[in-house]
Image (cartoon, grey):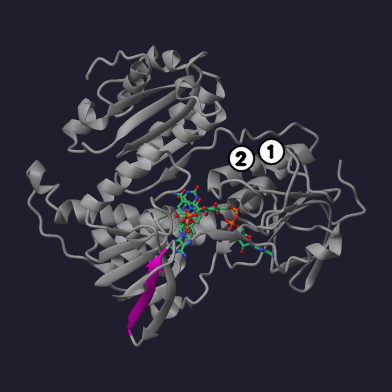
Amino acid sequence: MADHSYDYDVLVIGAGPGGYVAAIRAAQLGLKVACAEARETLGGTCLNVGCIPSKAMLHASEYFDAAANGTMASMGIDVAPKLNMDKMHAQRIDAVDGLTKGIEFLFKKNKVTWVKGLATFQDAHTVKVGDATVTAKDIVIATGSSVTPLPGVEVDNDKHVVVDSTGALELPKVPKKMVVIGGGVIGLELGSVWNRLGAEVTCVEFLDEILPGMDGDIRKDARKIFKKQGIEFKLSTKVTGVTVKGKKATLTLEPAAGGEEETMQADCVLVSIGRRPNTEGLGLEAIGLATNQRGQIETAHDFRTKVDNVWAIGDCIPGPMLAHKAEDEGIAVAENIAGETGIVNHDVIPSVVYTLPEIAGVGLTTEQAIEQAGGDKKAINVGKFPMMANSRAKTNHEPDGFVKVISDAETDRVLGVWCIASVAGTMIAEAGIAMEFGATSEDIAYTCHAHPTHAEAMKEAAMAVTGKPIHM
Ligand code: FAD
Ligand code: NAD
């Protein structure tokens, strides 16, 4: 029932995957909804400068690489590829345009009003959006995140020398030498794009291994695969500064633990050391809402903040900064506002790195599972199966990677699944469903998987938990 003392039942601030999904779901549930967005287009980081444009560049560069590196020749197709950078960028822009306009269409279809402009709280029911003032009974903060700056390093995307992820998506030509600061998801995905297109890429990582947060075996194997593809790594190293002269950058580096400084030259430097929540300038002080030490808004299980009728979701709250996590929270928060019960199981959120091969995981890593068992390695069983022994991967010339299933030694319940495979991002969905339904490794092992598919490696890894894979 609409409350006529407010302009809207719900105002969502931010139209990224969290915000636009929350707005649409709230409207579907019969509420009168507005969504404030400061950008010129809907879709947030993900559609405009994140998930979508990066995948457009990853996909296109995979084709170039397959033609250039002999993969196509090995299947009897002799080609000599010629790079048309403008066209590659045009198809990226096309993908972004189509999808952001798609959200505009969905807003119209579901009668969600888009209020254009930067939103600032006046009080817990009133928000200034540009020149307009909007009131709503419930307000959802879905303001997302932005690039974390690195002290001593100034990003200037327009000059194409020191760039962040947005600049790295738009480089007009392939740099000869590129240094990526940070061996996380963005560094590896965008480093892979330019490596495939011909840049010499070096990745500098502060920790002693890339991809923090992922399973230990996966991290090590992934680095070996990237190295084979031509990416160089400098681990346990920190960048202390970057100076730019004309079109050249000079980086100063030193060991993470401290020690002798060295320098490195590059034509392009990508700063990808993480993202931080967009909570400054939102006027949270006007509603008495404080952020935590990391600038995030803390919420209860149902995404309610400490202020009545103000909710928060997505990258601006704790948890992995992932589009699908934000989307699921968007659905749940709308359902909770409408008086239904919206829940997100934060223990089963898959993460995927869209390199080739892809890297994916869900649930606990081996290290976390052992730690949860008080350090008892015997408390878990692990089954592994190499993609080299999977008939489809072998036939497709995709021998790299493996699947790893971790289960509780007592109950056999699946605790985590990790894989490196050309289609790992698609394969991991099966593991997520299995875990949501409390499956055991035996449940996966006795589920018929189509042949020949990469997914059979998941079944075999599950069989390996109890030591009985067939094709090994
Ligand atoms: P956002 O998408 O950041 O959207 C927030 C929106 O709020 C923005 O449009 C912003 O303009 C707006 N806003 C902020 N403050 C205000 C204000 N005061 N008033 C009005 N509007 C405001 N995740 C994946 O799951 N898969 C991927 O493949 C993937 N690839 C990525 C690649 C890159 C290069 C980057 C940078 C990120 C990637 N991510 C990926 C992460 C993903 O983009 C984020 O997790 C996701 O966009 C978070 O959604 P959100 O709705 O919380 O916030
Ligand atoms: P990240 O947190 O994934 O990785 C940052 C890396 O930089 C870490 O390995 C960290 O140890 C390292 N680092 C930090 N400070 C450093 C320093 N001074 N010198 C050298 N290394 C340093 O962050 P990101 O790659 O910038 O990505 C940001 C967010 O975007 C991530 O949280 C991720 O979830 C999201 N994202 C997701 C996808 C995907 O799902 N495929 C793709 C891109 C981005």
Position of the N terminus by quadrant = top right
Mark pair 1, 2: CA separation: 6 Å
Q: Is residue 100 visible in the rendered structure shown here?
A: no
State the image coordinates of residue 228 (x, y, percent, origin top left). Answer: 21, 50
Task: Left or right? Give the position of 33 relative to 351.
Answer: right
- Toward the viewer: 454 or 30? 454
The magenta segment is 247-255
Instruction: Confirm or deny contact between disc 1 and disc 2 (CB under 8 A).
Output: yes
Vertically, is 446 above or below 233?
above
Give the residue number, with chain letter if any, for mark 1: 332
Q: What is the three-letter code of the residue carrying label 1?
A: Ala
Q: Nearer the viewer, residue 111 or 337?
A: 337
**Which residue lies at the image location 67% right of the left edge and 46% below the top edge?**
22
Q: Amino acid at mark 2?
A: Asp
Closest to the observer: 236 or 269?
Answer: 236
306 part of magenta stretch: no
Secondary structure state at the residue bearing disc 1:
helix
Is 252 colored magenta in this rendering?
yes
Q: Is residue 431 visible?
A: yes
Q: Residues within 10 Å of mark 1 (few under 14, many from 20)?
A: many
Horizontal side of residue 160 vs 120, given as left or right: left
Residue 396, how many percent across, how many down? 19, 36
Give the image quarter of residue 266: bottom left
Mark 2 element type: helix
User: Which residue lies under the disc numbered 2?
Assistant: 328
Mark 2 neighbour class, 10 Å CA radius: few under 14, some 14 to 19, many 20 or more: many
Q: Position of residue 28 (x, y in %)?
A: 70, 40
Residue at the extreme bottom = 246
Position of 27 with respect to 381 (left or right) is right
Residue shown at the point (26%, 29%) measured from the top left: 386
Q: Quadrant of ligand 1?
A: bottom right
Position of the C terminus by quadrant: top left
